[in-house]
Amino acid sequence: MLDCTPKEIKQRHGAVINPAKTCQPIGAMYAALGIHSCLPHSHGSQGCCSFHRMHLSRHFREPAMASTSSFTEGASVFGGGANLKTSIKNVFSIYNPEVMAIHTTCLTETIGDDIPSIIKSAEVPEGKLVIHANTPSYQGSHITGFSNMTKGMVTYIAEATSSAKKEQVNIIPGFVNPGDMREIKRLVKAMGIKFIMFPDTSGVMDAPMTGKFSMYPKGGATVAQIKDSGNSKLTLALGRFASNDAAEALTKKCQVPSTALKTPIGIKATDAMLLTLRRAFAQDVPAELEEERGQLVDIMTDTHFHFHGKTVAIFGDPDIVTGLTEFVLSLGMVPLHILTGTPGGAMGSSVGSFEDDVNEMISQAKITANVKAGGDLFTLHQWIKNQPVDLIIGNTYGKYIARAEDIPLVRVGFPVLDRSVHSYLPIVGYRGAMRLIESISGALLERADRDAADEDFELVM
């Protein structure tokens, strides 16, 4: 089918073909799963909740637990207040979570359900907590939904209870895999700094097989930890689109200073995170991390001829794409097409422009590239038809373009539905950069082997 994508690019108004994103509630559900003993709740129809759970389960190969208000025709017309009150009562009596995290859907947003008022009039057991985020599917993307739910955690839970700020840092990791969250925590632990990470899906969406079913695995940030985040000395928002709104809300509510950094993909962004922690907490970077960095530099030097001048198209979530763009530039690659489906932050969001961020990096590298926020895969495919590349980096949905144009695809980001184990292995930090180098180099060399004539088929490359 994609063989018929035309090269001629015409101006489109409103139409989206093959979106490069999914809807807000998926991101909100994933964020809520990063709270220990939390049950996400989809306020809408059963079909919405089923799709969101299925999409997360297919990416992580783990069950994504969530409940739903199960709208019928009556609730769709007259409002879902009664459904939500009944849901709150049933969820705590049957599933007994510590936290119920409600996110809305496009149906409830269109009706105009007043979620805070419904929560206040509902029967919430003593010691239990109900939080919410507004996540209309017709605005933003799953990244916006993740941001809104994380901001909701701050609004409902975080408190400044101590007279002086504690020597600890809040880490808001952004929409990344559990393996990435584990790696970020390992780096901060190696620095000897106390931290609170929220949301934290490690130990939840990568829980071990024990032979016994657990509705609420051991992982996730506890309510006590999120509450104590208001007493921290600093908040690091890793990835502005997914994390910055929550960090700024924490600044306003609890006067915790925040610093927005890129998702630590590659050597430059990882350096920035560690040096920010070093300055804030007067801690030296330990020898073990210096050794890892030196190994990465050695690998980049040894393999530079694999990457130099190779052209690449990158698509996916804005924070991941920004980090990947910076990283491939450091490898000597030429990113020609850079696209995200996320148009921007939520209403009133303080996050800046994806296009400005990427264009600044591109201009510094003296490269001319196509850069677009709020784009779709039809646009990306047309770009590639007009200016072919050596490699595509993005999620599973890029496989159709890769097949149609016979271009290698390196799967990075969300969702990856046709491969496994990826959610356990990091792409962040120095070790994550090593993994990315192996994946990118492997894809390029495999293509070189496939295309080589017999007399050019090399043993050593």
Image: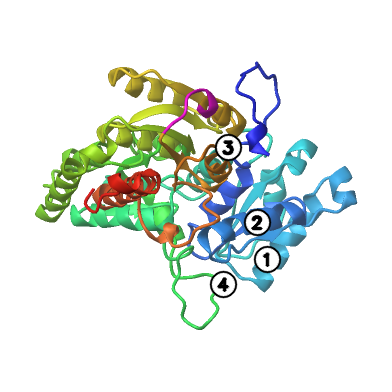
Residue at the limit of the structure toward the front, as seen here: 455
Q: Is residue 375 left or right of residue 194?
A: right
* Position in image of residue 284 (x %, y %): 11, 47
Q: CA distance from mark 4 to mark 2?
A: 14 Å
- Residue type at mark 3 is Ala
SS label for mark 4: loop
Q: Which residue is mark 2?
A: 41
First to last magenta residue range: 384-389
Q: Which residue is mark 1?
A: 91
Comparing marks 2 and 3, which lies closer to the viewer? 3
Residue 78 shown in magenta: no
Q: Which mark is residue 215?
A: 4
Comparing marks 1 and 2, which lies closer to the viewer? 2
- Residue visible at 52% across and 52% down in the picture: 416
Name the image colouring: rainbow
- Residue type at mark 1 is Val
Count of all numbered marks drawn on residues in the image:
4
Residue 385, picture quadrant: top right
Q: CA distance from mark 1 to mark 2?
A: 9 Å
Q: CA distance from mark 1 to mark 4?
A: 12 Å
| In contact (CB < 8 Å): disc 1 and disc 3 | no
- Residue type at mark 4 is Met
Q: Which mark is residue 20?
A: 3
